[in-house]
Amino acid sequence: MFAQFALHERLLKAVAELNFVEPTPVQAAAIPPALEGKDLRVIAQTGSGKTAAFVLPLLNRLLGDGNSQQRVSIRALILLPTRELAQQTLKEVERFAQFTFLKAGLVTGGEDFKVQAAMMRKIDILIGTPGRLIEHANAGNLPLNEVEVLVFDEADRMLDMGFAEDAQRLAEACGPHQTLLFSATTGGNGLREMVAKVLKAPQHLMLNSVSQLNEGTRQQIITADHNHHKEQLVDWLLANETYDKAIVFTNTRVQADRLYGKLVAAGVKAFVLHGEKDQKDRKLAIERLRQGAVKVLVATDVAARGLDVDGLDLVINFDMPRSGDEYVHRIGRTGRAGGEGLAISLICHGDWNLMSSIERYLKQRFERRTVKELKGSYQGPKNLKASGKAAGSKKKKTDKDAKKAAPKRKSGPRPAGKPSALVSEDGLAPLKRKKPAAE
């Protein structure tokens, strides 16, 4: 029960109004130390309820000051990697703060700069993306000296997108504060460096290691002969699987556009989302998916994070993601908050070893599946190493092969009419033959 936490009565009222009864594991683990003012480093899967795990303690701290109502300054900063995630977080903050006087505002790219600058003078909680916030900082619009709580959400993705320096600069601009850092994965060296710089004596919480992620999601692979075969499989899956909404992931914008065109031509209600789409298109794609006007979103990894759509229960990896972390983020779109989902990866000959590496990273084995109507000739490697990767088929060298590989050395004088190659004095480096002077 949320009543077990030492939360302000207005927050408990909001929690009851929203029908939150039992806290999720990440909420139960993170809220108590966050309420005590400790810095936290939390690893938790997307869709685990982590937003409430930092929003509730943040609001509680701001409400705890009896003079807070008279103060007008930015007292909390929440940094997120994408506009979509920032928009969703603003909605969550407003829901939990509905019975308080606290006001939150959103600053992301694609909106009016002057309007944002004016809005920031009237809010307590600022939610935004690092790039746009740095623009405001450079323009002198961003007073952060009274910030008491700083939150990094999806910190691993923030670093992947190149926001490390911006995020650190914003952290340094804040006054003395508590820092809460959340990510879906452990991340690499870059994230470890960031943790060391922005957190002070943090408490580390790991909720659901990657091997336990998305227990409500079935994970399957289907082998394919080539990209055209993959396109046929996508058509079949979208026509035959039972789903409310689906995302098909590709690794390139070109492939996303091509697949989208084929689906639309086949009468599928689809939309495409990738890095070259402007903010208006991205908003439109997500809204149409939410409203049900579109059932299928074809996307690159730009949409893999910060996308929270009810009823999203099918993910198809047309291309295998390039890392285990990206795989986790992709399938994190489905099977959220206890729901069931299905993630299917299409595997060609060149995808097998990458898929095998991701299985080892997750410490699990994907379910092998065959579509009888579209069974191809490639069914996986004939021989496997102990690691699960394809075993190379190296032929034994024969005497004939050895003779071919050996350098040919000729002795004795060359036949007349065949000029010998010029070599340096040591007999090793060939010299370029001088061209005769033009007549």
Image: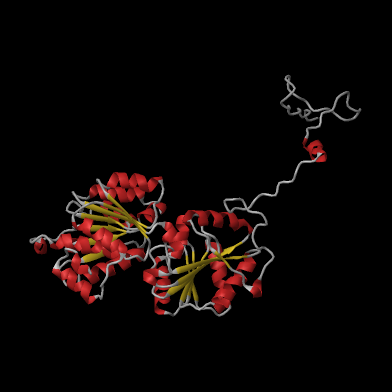
Q: Residue at x 55, y 62 (%)?
A: 319
* Residue situated in front as seen by the camera: 341 or 62: 341
Q: Indicate left or right for 204 with 240 as reference.
A: left
Q: Is residue 147 visible?
A: no
- Percent from the top left, x then y, of residue 118? 21, 63
Q: Indicate left or right for 142 with 163 as reference.
A: left
Q: Quadrant of residue 267?
A: bottom right
Q: Quadrant of residue 285?
A: bottom left
Compared with residue 270, is residue 403 higher up or lower down, i.e. above or below? above
Query: Which image quarter holds the C terminus?
Result: top right
Q: Quadrant of residue 57?
A: bottom left
Picture mark count: 0
- Percent from the top left, x then y, of residue 289? 43, 75
Query: Which image quarter holds the N terminus?
Result: bottom left
- Residue at the extreme right: 416
Q: Is residue 17 visible?
A: yes
- Residue at the extreme top: 425
- Percent from the top left, x then y, of residue 352? 59, 57
Q: Indicate left or right for 263 with 335 as reference.
A: right
Q: Residue at x 22, y 76 (%)?
A: 17
* Residue situated in front as seen by the camera: 284 or 304: 304
* Residue situated in front as seen by the camera: 112 or 407: 407
Q: Residue at x 46, y 63 (%)?
A: 330
Q: Residue at x 78, y 32 (%)?
A: 407
- Residue at the extreme front: 386
Compared with residue 311, is residue 176 higher up or lower down, i.e. above or below? above
> According to the image, what is the colour scheme of the structure?
secondary structure
- Percent from the top left, x then y, of residue 312? 43, 73
